[in-house]
Image (cartoon, grey):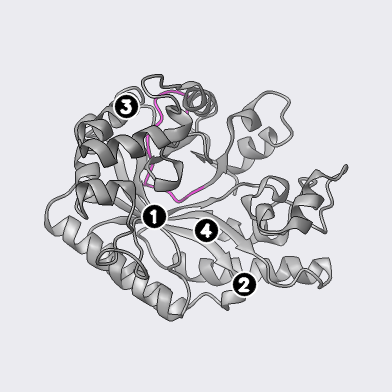
């Protein structure tokens, strides 16, 4: 996970090498922040965890705030790293005023103005964007497309319109879509893989500017092992459609917190290794981004009262936390980090 540090300056995607990165928060990049040395050493790709979404950028209509993106971009430029924008459209982080306006007016100019606030400002500084996040829903969607404010206002082709608008504002950026529950051998994951393949095929066939697909990596041990053969075939099919691939939001949700610590960490590392075994053999996979670096900052702690309690102990109760990231709550390296080194080697 030791990156090659490029000269500081304009930050663009370097698809000539495999990149390792993490979701980060602006305060983690500040001088003296405990996590900053690990980010500087381990990551060559930075993704804003929550600070880049629409509701974080423009909570109040007409008053966009760019300070968080600016801080991440400035740090990246100073340390030779790349930045991925995340994300332009995601239902869960769309401000209420925008949802109401879409339902009322069904005017695409609202979406365009949001894009116009970000893409031109960071052109040449952010080289890739997740344009649409989590658009697949084969259980309750409309022909497998999630029923969001965007889908309800603009129909299922909102994904294509979003990519086209993003390309208009920054024709040099690598544009992505991103989704989850694609790793396992169960009916839901199989249907979701098939629907995403169909979506990518239709977008590419129509000449829509889609350059990459993000495969979210929230691995749940309770679902069983990563379906290696199925995942390998899925990635190959995507690559044959002319897109590059990225493993995004990688972490592991444990299913047994009563085992001893070494066993827990080796189980997590084993799940990651099963994934790495597949992706290292697929040349189209260009990056892996963990959803955070340290367990103490993981969103997975929110899934359990016990882990929330462990998170606020002083010192942090590292045994009580879900242990699904490369470093524990005390920033000690775990076997997961060693396994990830195989990808960048």
> In 3D space, how far apart are the residues under numbered discs 3 and 2 (Cα atoms)?
39 Å
Q: Residue at x 87, y 43 (%)?
A: 315
> Left or right of 88: which side holds 65?
right
Chain-order first, disc 4 or disc 3: 3
Q: Separation of disc 2 and disc 4 at Cα? A: 21 Å
Q: CA distance from mark 2 to mark 1?
A: 21 Å
Q: Which residue is mark 3?
A: 123
Q: Which residue is mark 2?
A: 221
Query: In the displayed image of the protein, which residue is found farthest to the right?
Result: 314
Label 4: which secondary element = helix
Secondary structure state at the residue bearing disc 1: loop
Labels 2 and 1: the sequence-earlier one: 1
Q: Would residue 143 be seen by someone viewing this image from the given angle?
A: yes
Q: Which mark, by number, is residue 134?
A: 1
Q: Nearer the viewer, mark 3 or mark 2?
A: 2
Q: Is residue 48 left or right of residue 25?
A: left
User: CA gap, disc 3 to disc 1?
Assistant: 24 Å
């Amino acid at each position: 996970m030791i990156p090659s540090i490029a000269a500081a300056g304009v930050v663009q995607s370097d698809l000539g090498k495999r990149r390792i990165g993490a979701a980060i928060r602006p305060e983690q990049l500040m001088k003296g922040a405990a996590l900053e040395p690990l980010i500087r050493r381990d990551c060559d790709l930075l993704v804003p965890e929550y600070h880049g979404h629409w509701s974080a950028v423009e909570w109040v209509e007409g008053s966009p705030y760019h300070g968080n993106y600016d801080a991440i971009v400035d740090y990246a430029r100073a340390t030779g790293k790349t930045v991925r924008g995340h994300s332009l459209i995601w239902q869960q982080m769309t401000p209420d005023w925008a949802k109401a306006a879409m339902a009322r007016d069904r005017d695409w100019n609202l979406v365009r103005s949001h894009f116009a606030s970000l893409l031109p400002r960071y052109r040449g500084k952010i080289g890739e964007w997740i344009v649409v996040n989590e658009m697949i829903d084969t259980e309750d969607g409309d022909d497998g497309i999630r029923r969001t404010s965007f889908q309800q206002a603009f129909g299922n082709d909102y994904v294509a319109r979003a990519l086209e608008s993003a390309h208009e504002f920054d024709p040099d950026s690598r544009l992505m879509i991103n989704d989850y529950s694609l790793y396992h051998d169960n009916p839901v994951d199989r249907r979701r893989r098939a629907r995403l393949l169909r979506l990518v095929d239709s977008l590419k066939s129509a000449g829509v500017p889609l350059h990459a697909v993000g495969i979210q990596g929230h691995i749940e041990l309770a679902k069983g092992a990563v379906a290696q053969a199925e995942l390998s075939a899925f990635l190959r099919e995507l690559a044959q459609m002319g897109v590059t691939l990225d493993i995004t939001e990688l972490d592991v949700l444990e299913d047994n917190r009563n085992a001893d610590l070494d066993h827990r960490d080796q189980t997590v590392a084993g799940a990651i290794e099963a994934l790495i075994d597949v992706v290292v053999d697929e040349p189209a996979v260009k990056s892996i981004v963990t959803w955070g670096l340290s367990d103490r900052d993981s969103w997975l702690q929110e899934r359990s009262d016990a882990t929330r309690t462990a998170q606020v102990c002083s010192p942090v109760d590292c045994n009580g936390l879900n242990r699904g990231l490369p470093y524990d709550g005390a920033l000690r390296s775990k076997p997961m980090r060693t396994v990830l080194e195989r990808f960048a080697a």
